[in-house]
Image (tube, rainbow, N blue to C red):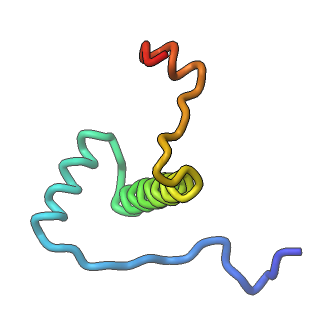
Amino acid sequence: MVNPDVSASVSFQTRVPRDLALEVTQAMLVLGIDGRSEAVRQGLRLLTKEARHQALQAEMEEFYGDTKAPLSPVTRLLTDAG
């Protein structure tokens, strides 16, 4: 059961340097992102996606050690590595 006292969302706030703000504004225009909140949500999604990728890479490196991880049959076919 969901606790009714806990909100379904939380607020993140930060101040950013002016040059970054201008760069983000340009990126929002290019990507068609309407509003700072949506830009922050997209950025946080990318941040967590990158963290998951890095964690998976670390797990694979730990599992395989100095041995190169094997390629899947599909990867071998697509890259002519087989």
Residue 29 appears in view = yes
Say whether residue 62 is left or right of residue 13.
right
* Residue at image location 48% in from the left, 41% down from the top: 68
In the rendered image, the quadrant that contains the N terminus is bottom right
* Residue at image location 52% in from the left, 22% down from the top: 75
Q: Which x, y percent locates residue 53?
A: 48, 52
Image height check: is 74 above or below 58? above
Observer-nearest of 78 and 36: 78
Image height check: is 11 above or below 37? below
Q: Which x, y percent locates residue 9?
A: 60, 72
Q: Which x, y percent locates residue 24?
A: 22, 56
Image height check: is 44 above or below 5? above
Residue 41 appears in view = no
Instruction: Please count the marks in the image.
Output: 0
Most extreme residue toward the right is 1
Observer-nearest of 72 and 56: 72
Most extreme residue toward the front is 66
* Residue at image location 38% in from the left, 62% down from the top: 40
Say whether residue 65 is left or right of residue 7.
left
Res 4 quadrant in image: bottom right
Observer-nearest of 14 and 50: 50
Say whether residue 54 is left or right of residue 9.
left
Most extreme residue toward the left is 19
Q: Which x, y percent locates residue 28?
A: 28, 48
Say whether residue 35 is left or right of residue 23.
right
* Residue at image location 49% in from the left, 16% down from the top: 82
